[in-house]
Image (cartoon, helix red, strand yellow):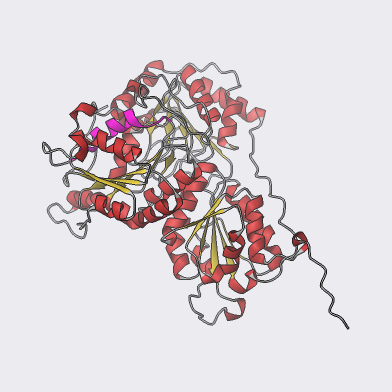
């Protein structure tokens, strides 16, 4: 009998493997990038990504991959996706999951697992996925049914984005990934609830505002837009109601009206040489600063003195309230999309609503609060004084092409911030990790656009550089600057190679004071004269950057910083400016407000 050629099979009808179906569903969910370190436990997913429009960003460490995914979730609202292998890979990614959980940021972590038949035998790199991540993720699920791959991905994205956002961990056994999962290209993405307040709830809040003499608004959380932030600030300014931001949620609202960015974060802005981010900070507005570490004393006083505090998207938590000590007994309204998780103290009205959407409803309600205008004005004035650095050195005061100055041994970070306020584009994205170096950008760099800050609210070190990589890839038209301490930088500084390899462009300022300054500061207070375990031995960061193919330059005087920054920005490369700081300096100079 003659051989008969088989009928050609339509690729659309060919059964997909579970690994390929995962990729297909991620495409349907709108995912544009996955970050990860490759592992043999998820080869079939990597094979599915080969022909996918999703970009695979190969990182140098799983912690870097996790932080990049977290940054993407913070900046775009869609969960960032990281992929790591079992055991050691999962352990390295744990820091990003913890950060996403405490920061309430949407994120998906795929973890390759051992074959199903090998479970419970202490197989190579075996571990208990739920045991590890169950206490610090919104959901942990293992894919044991290949036909459920699309559904599991869709449900995980839904969970990560709904209510209080957070991380979801998906275990993917390597043998299950290769099994047939059907011919479907995925399932319809699940709608994400954005609850709105009832009219009665809005009217009740308006009555509370009208009764209060010193009402205060505290903003935080995710998904603030240019529209919601600007509308809130115009409404609050019109009624003389001060607005504070939760710790490291400073980009929720524009800091001064008149200079805010009108277009969305997807678009980069062009800035002419005559424009500046500073503009003397004379713009009007109701923003009066931030709470948490590095806050001004005036912000703490506002929390103490308010007779009505309205929390929009942020609970009154540990850091915001100075360790559960401030503002606990004032009349309190809490607006959150889920429950009151993380909130401490009094609640007089709870509204289950998406805070940015709630704002757009609130500002349409007529209100005539009789507020303490002098209290409001004093708060704004105190904020401007606290956040205005000394005048920046002019370009003519630089030291030529070297970026060095022989007149001073160290760089004054306050002067650096003054230069950045004049140089940065209005929608620039700022990233940093944890440490004393973060006090300067948090205090001195204003935000005019949403999705312009990525920094860990849980205090995780090593986030700044991975976040800068993700920010540049997510928003290629926007300027990105990362401020890093020498300790924080080298925890994930190797991701500079990822930036070079994938075309991410940013300027990283590495503040070199030769120690873990935050811990040294605590030692100086509790154990004066007995520093222990906090000294660092650092490389030449500029030479190190150049070895990666990036731009690198050392700056030893703030008078050389402006031109060095311009050279770094003009290089078109990921750039490192190595700033030599006085080891005795721990924080910006104290300002009495």
Viewport quadrant of the N terminus: bottom right
What range of the chain is rendered magenta? 411-426
- Relative depth, front residue between 244 and 42: 42
Q: Is residue 244 left or right of residue 114?
A: left
Identify the residue at horizontal 62%, vertical 62% (top origin).
48
Residue projecting furthest to the front: 2
- 506 up-or-down from 312: above or below: below
Examine the rendering and report whether any part of residue 295 can be seen: no
Q: Position of residue 243 (x, y in %)?
A: 44, 28
Residue projecting furthest to the right: 1
- Relative depth, front residue between 377 and 308: 377
Q: Is residue 500 left or right of residue 587?
A: right
The quarter of the picture where residue 142 lies is bottom right
The quarter of the picture where residue 149 lies is bottom right
Q: Is residue 33 left or right of residue 467?
A: right
- Relative depth, front residue between 192 and 20: 20
- In the image, residue 186 lies in the stretch drawn in magenta: no
Examine the rendering and report whether any part of residue 112 can be seen: yes
Q: Position of residue 233 (x, y in %)?
A: 48, 24
Viewport quadrant of the C terminus: top left
Callout count: 0
Identify the residue at horizontal 50%, vertical 70% (top origin).
86
Looking at the magenta stretch, what is its main secondary structure?
helix
Identify the residue at horizontal 46%, vertical 30% (top origin).
269
- 187 up-or-down from 446: above or below: below
The quarter of the picture where residue 51 lies is bottom right
Q: Position of residue 282 (x, y in %)?
A: 35, 19
């Amino acid at each position: 009998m003659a051989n008969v050629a088989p009928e050609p099979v339509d690729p659309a009808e060919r059964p997909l493997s579970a690994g390929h179906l995962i990729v297909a569903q991620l495409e349907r969910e709108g995912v544009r990038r996955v970050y990860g370190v490759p592992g043999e436990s998820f080869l079939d997913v990597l094979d599915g990504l080969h022909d996918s429009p999703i970009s695979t960003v190969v990182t140098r460490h799983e912690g870097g991959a996790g932080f990049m995914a977290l940054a993407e979730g913070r900046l775009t609202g869609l969960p960032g996706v990281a992929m790591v292998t079992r055991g050691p890979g999962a352990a390295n990614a744990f820091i990003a999951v913890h950060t996403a959980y405490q920061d309430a940021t949407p994120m998906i972590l795929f973890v390759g697992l051992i074959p199903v038949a090998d479970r419970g035998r202490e197989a190579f790199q075996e571990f208990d996925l739920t045991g590890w991540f169950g206490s610090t993720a919104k959901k942990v699920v293992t894919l044991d049914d290949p036909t459920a791959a699309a559904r599991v991905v869709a449900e995980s994205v839904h969970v990560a984005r709904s209510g209080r956002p957070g991380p979801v961990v998906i275990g993917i056994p390597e043998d299950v990934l290769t099994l047939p999962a059907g011919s479907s290209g995925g399932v319809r993405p699940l709608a994400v609830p954005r609850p709105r307040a009832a009219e009665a709830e809005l009217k009740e809040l308006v009555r509370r505002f009208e009764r209060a003499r010193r009402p205060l608004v505290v903003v935080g959380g995710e998904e603030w837009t240019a529209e919601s932030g600007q509308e809130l600030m115009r409404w609050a300014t019109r009624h003389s109601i001060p607005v504070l931001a939760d710790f490291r949620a400073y980009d929720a609202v524009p800091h001064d009206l008149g200079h805010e960015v009108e277009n969305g974060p997807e678009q980069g802005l062009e800035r002419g040489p005559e424009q500046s981010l500073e503009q003397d900070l004379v713009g009007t507005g109701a923003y009066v600063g931030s709470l948490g570490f590095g806050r001004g004393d005036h912000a703490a006083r506002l929390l103490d003195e308010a007779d009505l505090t309205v929390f929009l998207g942020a609970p009154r938590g540990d850091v915001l309230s100075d360790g559960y000590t401030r503002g606990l007994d004032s009349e309190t309204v809490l607006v959150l999309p889920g429950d009151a998780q993380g909130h401490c103290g009094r609640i007089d009205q709870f509204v289950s609503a998406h805070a940015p959407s709630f704002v757009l409803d609130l500002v349409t309600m007529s209100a005539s609060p009789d507020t303490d205008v002098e209290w409001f004005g004093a708060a704004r004035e105190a904020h401007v004084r606290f956040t205005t650095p000394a005048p920046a050195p002019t370009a003519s005061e630089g030291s030529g092409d070297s970026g060095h100055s022989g007149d001073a041994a160290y760089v004054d970070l306050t002067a650096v911030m003054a230069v950045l306020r004049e140089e940065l584009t209005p929608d620039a994205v700022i990233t940093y990790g944890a440490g004393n170096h973060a006090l300067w950008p948090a205090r001195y760099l204003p935000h005019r656009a949403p999705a312009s800050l990525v920094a860990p609210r849980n205090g995780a070190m090593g986030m700044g550089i991975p976040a800068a990589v993700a920010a540049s890839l997510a928003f290629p038209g926007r300027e990105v600057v990362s401020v890093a301490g020498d300790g924080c930088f080298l925890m994930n500084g190797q991701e500079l190679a990822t930036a070079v390899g994938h075309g991410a462009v940013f300027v990283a300022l590495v503040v070199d004071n030769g120690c873990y300054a935050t811990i040294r500061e605590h030692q100086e207070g509790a154990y004066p004269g007995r520093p222990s375990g906090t000294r660092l031995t650092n490389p030449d960061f500029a030479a190190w950057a150049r070895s990666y193919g990036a731009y690198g330059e050392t700056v030893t005087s703030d008078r050389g910083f402006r031109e060095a920054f311009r050279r770094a920005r003009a290089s078109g490369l990921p750039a490192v400016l190595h700033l030599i700081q006085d080891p005795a300096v721990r924080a910006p100079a104290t300002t009495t407000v």
